[in-house]
Image: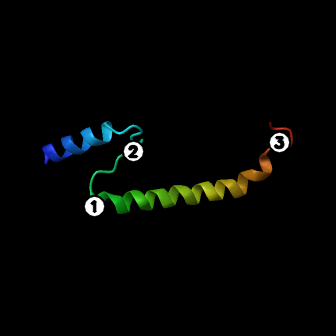
Amino acid sequence: MRKVFFVTGAGVAGLEQPPQRFVAGDDCLEAVEAKARQLLAQVDASRELGTNLAHANAS
């Protein structure tokens, strides 16, 4: 198992633009996707609440 992670890690590290986060294993993907959906929902809620707080001259 360690060899698989080493080979995969070396492959990711060798990318020109490696991902900021690497999810190793199909069993983790669903949980990470669920967390991403949760965070996006929070962004949408914040956008709705915070849009009217912007300054007119904020440039």
Residue shown at the point (34%, 59%) measured from the top left:
29
Q: Position of residue 16 (x, y in %)?
A: 39, 37
Residue 55's label in the rendered image is: 3
Q: At which x and y percent is residue 39?
A: 52, 55
Q: CA distance from mark 3 to mark 1?
A: 45 Å
State the residue position of label 1: 27
Mark nearer the N terminus (2 vs 1): 2
As helix, strand or loop, the secondary structure at mark 1 comes to helix
**SS of the residue at dot 3?**
loop
User: Which residue is pictured at 43% across the width and 62% down the height?
Assistant: 34
Mark 2 surroundings: few (<14), some (14-19) or many (≥20) residues within 10 A: few
Q: Is residue 56 left or right of residue 8?
A: right
Whether residues under marks 2 and 3 lie with C-beta atoms below 8 angstroms apart, the answer is no
- Asked if disc 3 and disc 1 are in contact, CB closer than 8 Å, the reply is no
* Type of colouring: rainbow
Q: Position of residue 4 (x, y in %)?
A: 17, 47
Residue placed furthest toward the front: 16
Residue 52: image x %, image y %?
Answer: 79, 52
Q: Earlier in the sequence, mark 3 or mark 1?
A: 1
* Residue receiving disc 2: 21
Which residue shows up at 14% across the image and 43% down it? 3
- Whole-number angstrom distance, CA of label 2 to CA of label 1: 16 Å
Quadrant hosting residue 44: bottom right
Q: Amino acid at mark 1?
A: Asp
Q: Residue at left 40%, top 43%?
A: 19
